[in-house]
Image (cartoon, helix red, strand yellow):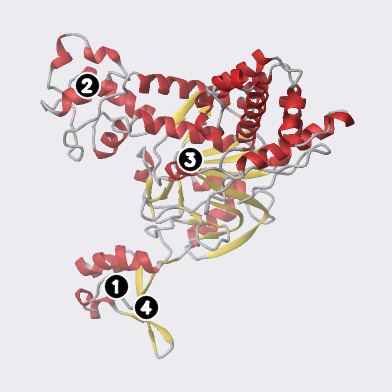
Amino acid sequence: MRAVLALSILSASIVAILPARAQATGADAAVLATEAVSPAAIGRLAERLARLEEDGLDPRWYNIPGAELAASDPARYRAETMRAAQAAMQDLLLGRVAQIRGRVDLRRDPASVRLAAWVNDLSTASEPADVIDRAAVLPADARALKAELARYRALAAAGGWPRITGDRVRTLEPGATDPVRVPQLRARLAFVDPAVMQGASATSPVYDAQLQAAARAFQEQEGLEADGRVGSITWTALNQSVEDKISQLRVALDMRRGAPAPAAERRIEVNIPHFRLHLLEGDRVVRDMAVIVGRRDRQTPMLNVRMTSVQFNPQWGVPERNAREDLLPRLQRNPAAVQSAGFRLYQRVEGEVVEVDPSTVDFSAYNRNNFPYYIRQDAGERNALGRIKFVMPNGDDIYMHDTPDRHLFTRGQRAFSSGCIRLERPMELLSEALSGTTGWDRTRVDQVLASRRTASTPIARSIPVRLHYTTTIVEGGRVIMRQDIYGLDADYARAMERAPAQRVAAAEGGAQRGTALR
């Protein structure tokens, strides 16, 4: 089916460009369209297709004919090579993965690609391999990502780096002596700083200053706390294989294919694995701040929503899961401490919700599967939502908010929340959100916050908010990779392995609209 669909697109384009006498169908049409291309150029095209790994694709996906067919059946070799090229070019232009359930952050704009024009170029170019080369670098950042992919493939071909097999839970402290883990760490960090394997200390079991410097450089590269203390998070990052890095880069390339141009309007984008929020206008970054996102077991969902209002001094209606899993153990240990933090306990009695005095409840009688109470936290300094809540209506009850836990923003890995987005500098975002909203200035904001009363206001201009998952970015030509904290890159890589449906586009007219046949 894949070959037939690919051939149908190629044939449709051929019909549009060949004289009437040559408007054949099927393999005959493919041969006629490329009969002016020299056999040597077809051979170079096949060689280029055999190198699709440099573009993050697998040549085995495209049934590239072997060189022996060129000698035994030149016409068939020509047709099958062009058929494989057309299928590969569609993946290079539109992305191999059309969509994944739950990934509303994935964006494709097939109309902007003009697939039929590319098919025509491939069919008529004297060097069709050049057309594949142009398609391969069309997405944003493609050259930088391809160069990084080539670097990691070279490392893989050389055997990659060694794995840490020692204790990966206990923290290795600066100055410590460890005859098992220090040599392993030294061998691994030699890929960051080869000097650690030179000199008198190269075989030392002491976690010395030179090795600490290499560890800090690695931590900084990975977006971790660069303190030289090697704990479980750093051990995990050290043990990420070269093959995992290659997989991330292949995903990064594919995710960018067929992507729409950046919107011109003011918008917010939160990159989950990079723990960053950007307020953008076109390509210009207006605000940039750290965020805290959902834990691995309470993941922040991908969303395309709009911020519509702001709430000051919010109360927190504790979600049932948080109440059962987080607050119940605290209530069992010290109910008075929970109460002093502003938490109130409620229960439904004869259809009415009434407040319950925590001191009258035997919390040891309850567990996470049996807890008949509702919990709300009053507004105040210790409220989990801080002083400001940014409302963006959605079915997952996700919002952005302030937090009293400011110390967590110093951490490199910031997946600590139950799904909502905690903001490093909420007052800066508030200033942007209220821009143009009549009657609201900093003086009034300060008055409302000081009152400690809960109040809300709609904002004059709602702001698009996109929560997306992009582990690999390019800044200033430098590729920056972060951990696949939710495993979504791994899911995407598996989707790439599955044969995708072809996008069928009409060959007539200008911009084309692709349709995924799934």
Q: Which residue is mark 3?
A: 497
Amino acid type, mark 4: Tyr
Q: Which callout, 2 or 4, points at the residue further toward the start of the chain?
A: 2
Is any part of residue 340 visible from this angle?
no
Q: Which callout, 4 or 3, points at the residue further toward the start of the chain?
A: 4
* CA separation in Å, label 3 and label 1: 40 Å
Q: Which mark is residue 369?
A: 1
- Foreground residue, 144 or 124? 124
User: How far across and down, in percent of the image, does residue 1 sit?
Assistant: 62, 45
Circle 2/circle 4 CB separation < 8 Å: no
Tell which tag, 3 or 2, sits nearer the viewer.
Answer: 3
Tell which tag, 2 or 4, sits nearer the viewer.
Answer: 2
* CA separation in Å, label 4 and label 3: 51 Å
Residue at image position (55%, 32%) is: 63
Tell which tag, 3 or 1, sits nearer the viewer.
Answer: 3
Q: Residues within 10 Å of mark 4 (few under 14, many from 20)?
A: some
